[in-house]
């Protein structure tokens, strides 16, 4: 079964253990739904990612075509993991919204800088 996850991708990580066991993770934050009374702030979702996908996205970042954090649409496969919990594994991911190449240079953060998202505070008199 497949699903699509939309949210702010905070970061991508990968690991390699002894050359045999390797993979990666996509860390997505979404607004709190309020369903879990033990969670304050945004909800974090971890999505498994193929090891090779990290290199693809790293090349896009280095070319200035992609930056993090950003809103993304991630197509995922759903499988059952340990303790009958659903495991999401990324099949593909793309920027959700305007094409980053079409944005003006002033809207794009420079590589290695943080991007602040959300509303601006009101002007003080």
Image (cartoon, rainbow, N blue to C red):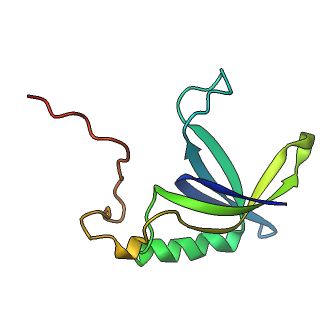
Residue at figure coordinates x 52%, y 72% from the top left: 58
- Compare residues 46 and 8 and report the one nearer the observer: 8
Q: Report the quarter where the N terminus lies.
A: bottom right
On screen, 25 above or below 61? Answer: above
Could you tell whether 43 is left or right of 69 in the image?
A: right
- How far across and down, in percent of the image, does residue 107 sit? 29, 62
Is 21 placed left or right of 102 in the picture? right
Please tell me whether residue 52 is drawn above or below residue 95 in the rendered image. Answer: below
- Residue 46 x/y as whole percent: 67, 49
Q: Looking at the picture, how far across and down is residue 65, in whole percent?
A: 42, 75
Q: Image quarter for residue 54?
A: bottom right
Residue at the spot 13% in from the left edge and 29% down from the top edge: 124
Q: Which residue is drawn at 91% across and 39% down?
A: 83
Front residue of 23 and 53: 53
* Residue 17 appears anywhere in the view: no
In the image shown, does 98 or 36 lie closer to the viewer? 98
Specify the quadrant that holds the C terminus. top left
Q: Quadrant of residue 23?
A: bottom right
Tell me where residue 101 appears, x and y as whole percent. Answer: 38, 76
């Amino acid at each position: 079964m497949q699903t699509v996850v939309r949210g702010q991708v905070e970061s991508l990580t990968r690991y390699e253990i002894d050359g045999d066991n390797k993979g990666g993770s996509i860390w997505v934050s979404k607004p709190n739904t309020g369903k879990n009374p033990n969670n304050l702030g945004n909800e974090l979702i971890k999505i498994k990612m193929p090891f090779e996908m990290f290199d693809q996205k790293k090349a896009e970042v280095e070319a200035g075509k992609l930056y993090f954090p950003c809103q993304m649409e991630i197509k995922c496969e759903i499988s059952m993991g340990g303790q009958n919990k659903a495991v999401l594994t990324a099949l593909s991911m793309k920027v959700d919204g305007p094409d980053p190449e079409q944005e003006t240079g002033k809207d794009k953060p420079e590589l290695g800088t943080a991007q602040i998202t959300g509303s601006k505070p009101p002007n003080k008199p």
